[in-house]
Image (cartoon, rainbow, N blue to C red):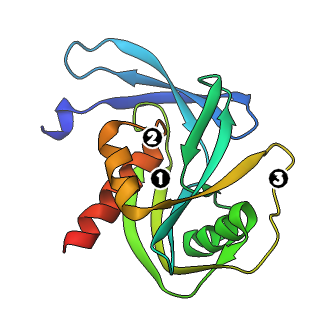
Amino acid sequence: MTQTDQWLRLRSEEGPNLKLFRARFDYMRNPRNGETERMIVLESADSVNVVALTAEQEMLFVRQYRFGIGQETLELPGGIVDPGEDHFLGAVRELREETGFTGSNWTYLGQVASNPVFMDSYIHNWLLEDAQPTHELHLDAGEAVTLERIPVARVRAMLWEGAFLHPHTVSALVRFFAHQTV
């Protein structure tokens, strides 16, 4: 695709400020037909997910209610990186807050776009291989989570069975299991 074949942003306007996101409307010229489309982009900070393993080779998960689908999901601990915070430090903080676990053997598993259809952020996947309970939970006002420990072999089966509904958990687990075979 050449430069003239790419979408051209003609202008942007601010949309509503939402709890976790700021909406923006971009007016984009379609390179195929020259028509202008109004597109929405949700701006937010990057997020983190943590694949945390205990000495017993159990993986830590949090079960929480997700309003978008109206049901509880089983997910890896994680959340939005605070303003000015490095994503590694965000991973350490989120794991400690949501599970009470910490550790020192961290590996970066990479990033994936949150949802490139309409979001401008990325999710960073981290692996902690020596997770141990050291703190009490410190949940945000809007959080209610239950901690679950699942043996790694069972997690692999659950992944292929489609037990995980959150795409960020699925992508982090795929990266983790690919990392394990290297």
Please rate how many residues cluster around mark 2, counting C-alpha atoms within 10 Å: few if below 14, some from 14 to 19, many from 20.
some
Mark 3 crowdedness (10 Å alpha carbons): few <14, some 14-19, many ≥20: few
Mark 3 and mark 1: span between their CA atoms?
21 Å
In the rendered image, residue 45, in percent from the top left (x then y), is placed at 61, 53
Near-viewer residue (112 or 23)? 112
For mark 2, what is the residue? 164
Q: In the rendered view, would you say 167 is above or below 124?
A: above
Position of residue 147 relative to residue 42, above or below, is below
Quarter location, residue 65? top right
The answer to whether residue 37 of the structure is visible from this angle is: yes
Image location of residue 96, percent across then percent down: 70, 70
* Labelled disc at residue 122: 1
Residue at the spot x=81%, y=56% of the render?
139
Q: Residues within 10 Å of mark 1 (few under 14, many from 20)?
A: some
Kindly check if marks 3 and 1 are in contact, taking CB atoms under 8 A apart as contact: no
What amino acid type is highlighted by mark number 3?
Asp
Q: Sequence order check: which comes first, mark 2 or mark 3?
A: 3
Residue 69, disc: none
Q: Give the secondary structure at mark 2.
A: loop
Going 65% across and 22% down the picture, which residue do you hit? 70
Type of amino acid at the residue the image marks with label 2 = Phe
| Nearer to me, 19 or 107 | 107
Direction from residue 10 to residue 71 in the image, left or right: right
Q: Which residue is mark 3?
A: 140
In the rendered structure, the answer to whether residue 143 lies left or right of residue 168 reads right
Q: Tell me the kind of residue under disc 1.
A: Tyr
Q: Residue at x 19, y 33 (%)?
A: 4
Quarter of the C terminus within the rendering = bottom left
Mark 3 or mark 1, which has the lower sequence index? 1
